[in-house]
């Protein structure tokens, strides 16, 4: 394959052999899996309050496979928000995957179209972070590495969601304080995505819009207003200069540092 | 609630339809992702904004009609969670602490 990164990576000797790099990927992946399982548990608990069935939870984890939007959808379902609003929020939250897919695309361009179409379904924050790092270490695409990266998030997330649902169904969630898990998880996840003052401004702007609009027009309208308008508060600030150093210096500047942070926190 | 209800499966499919194109288009049609810089910047900021709005709406507003501002142990517990996640980067630790805080407060009759 020609140089997939465009930065001359394949012109140099790969930093690790394929086997070494897969072992590296597995070590990193297990660390992610150890977070994905408990976060999946939290998701499973939250879906009880939104009146999901166990089948709904498992199907959502397998079909959507996008934790931030799944958490958001559970909150919106709980407040009886229209599905159109849930679709809009999902689109907004998951639009960042465009950036991940674009970063992986140079490595997968020679693969059959059908394989790429299937691979795309599993391109979560973590799969992206693990697979891209693996490809860069070996200087080319590796299907086994990609699927390993996908598996370490797909299975713990889905199993965690199901376990959380089953465990939570057996207890009084309000008495045990589990109703706070949802807003706490959302606040924590939002923080995990923050990597600079523009992100802070966007998050603060979203809260400043969502609460008053929610008081006037209802929580789901406030949420959508905050999510759509909030980013403009971040855009109003000047962009911070990109730090081009370390092993990822050759990656496009559009790859957010927050990706790896999200990966560490175990959210698909 | 039925463990085998199919009620929200169409919603999962709808969410997949809103997610999959972002994941697939650049891989299937390279070059399509070349968005204007402002659009890329907006997309990067949409994630934290949406989740922050979601947290705020869920811990600061009641579900009554019309909604009221909610103050008390729940927003406090969320704030504690934020501090813990900011210091440790461990989401589970933050959420677990918030849950324990609320459970204890309710057990002693504070909330």
Image (spheres, grey):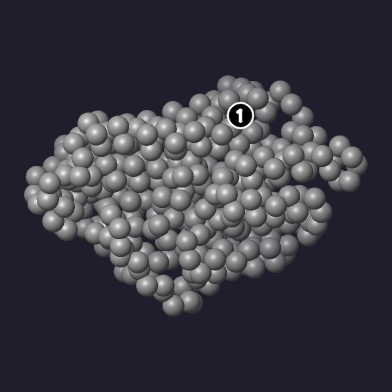
Q: Which of B106 and A7 is in front in this view?
A: A7
Is residue A19 visible to us here?
yes
Please give left or right for residue A24 compared with residue A239 in the image.
Answer: left
Front residue of this view, candidates B109 and A51: B109
The picture places residue B99, in percent across and down from the top left corner, at 72, 41
Please tell me whether mark 1 sits on a helix, a strand or a loop: helix
Disc 1 residue crowd, few under 14, some 14–19, many 20+, Cα 10 Å: many
Name above or below for residue A119 compared with residue B45: above
Image quarter (top left, top right, bottom left or bottom right) of the C terminus of chain A: top left
Quadrant in which residue A111 is drawn: top left
Dot 1 falls on which chain?
Answer: A
Residue A64: quadrant of the picture: top left
* Number of numbered discs overlaid on the protein picture: 1
Which residue occupies 41% across, 52% down?
A259
**Which residue is drawn at the image coordinates 30% and 49% (left, top)?**
A101
Can you give x and y, in whole percent of width and height, for residue B102 in the image? 78, 43
Residue at x 12% of width, y 50% of height: A12
Quarter the N terminus of chain A occupies: top left
* In the foreground, B3 or A68: A68
Residue shown at 89%/40% (left/top)?
B108
Compared to residue A140, the image places residue A167 above or below, namely above
- Residue at far right of view: B109
| Residue A66 in view | no
Residue on which the image places disc 1: A164
The percent position of residue B75, horizontal first and vertical second, equals: 74, 54
Q: Position of residue A99 (x, y in %)?
A: 33, 55
Q: Is residue B30 left or right of residue A96?
A: left
């Amino acid at each position: 394959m020609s140089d997939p990164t465009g930065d001359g990576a394949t012109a140099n000797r790969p930093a690790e052999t394929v086997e070494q790099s897969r072992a590296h990927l597995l070590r990193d992946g297990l660390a992610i899996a150890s977070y994905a399982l408990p976060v999946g548990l939290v998701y499973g608990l939250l879906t009880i309050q939104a009146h999901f069935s166990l089948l709904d939870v498992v199907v959502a984890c397998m079909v959507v496979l996008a934790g931030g939007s799944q958490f958001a959808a559970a909150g919106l379902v709980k407040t009886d928000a229209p599905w159109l609003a849930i679709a809009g929020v999902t689109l907004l939250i998951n639009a960042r995957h465009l950036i991940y897919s674009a970063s992986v695309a140079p490595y997968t361009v020679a693969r059959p179209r059908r394989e790429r179409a299937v691979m795309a379904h599993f391109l979560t924050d973590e799969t992206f972070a693990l697979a891209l790092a693996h490809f860069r270490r070996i200087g080319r695409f590796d299907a086994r590495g990609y699927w390993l990266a996908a598996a370490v998030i797909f299975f713990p997330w889905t199993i965690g969601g199901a376990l959380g649902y089953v465990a939570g169904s057996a207890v009084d969630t309000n008495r045990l304080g589990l109703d706070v898990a949802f807003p706490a998880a959302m606040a924590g996840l939002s923080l995990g995505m923050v990597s600079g003052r523009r992100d802070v401004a966007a998050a603060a702007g979203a809260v400043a819009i969502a609460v008053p609009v929610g008081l006037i027009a209802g929580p789901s309208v406030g949420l959508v207003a905050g999510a759509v308008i909030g980013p403009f508060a971040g855009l109003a600030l000047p962009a911070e200069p990109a730090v081009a150093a370390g092993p990822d210096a050759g990656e496009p500047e559009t790859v957010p540092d927050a990706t790896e942070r999200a990966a560490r926190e175990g959210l698909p | 609630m039925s463990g085998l209800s199919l009620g929200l499966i169409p919603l999962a499919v709808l969410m997949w339809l809103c997610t999959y194109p972002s994941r697939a288009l650049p891989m299937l049609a390279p070059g399509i992702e070349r968005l204007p810089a402002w659009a890329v910047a907006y997309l990067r900021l949409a994630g934290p904004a949406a989740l922050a709005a979601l947290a705020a709406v869920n811990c600061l507003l009641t579900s009554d009609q019309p909604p009221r501002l909610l103050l008390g142990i729940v927003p406090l517990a969320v704030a504690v969670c934020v501090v813990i996640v900011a210091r440790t980067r461990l989401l589970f630790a933050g959420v677990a602490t918030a849950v324990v805080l609320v459970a204890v407060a309710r057990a002693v009759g504070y909330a």
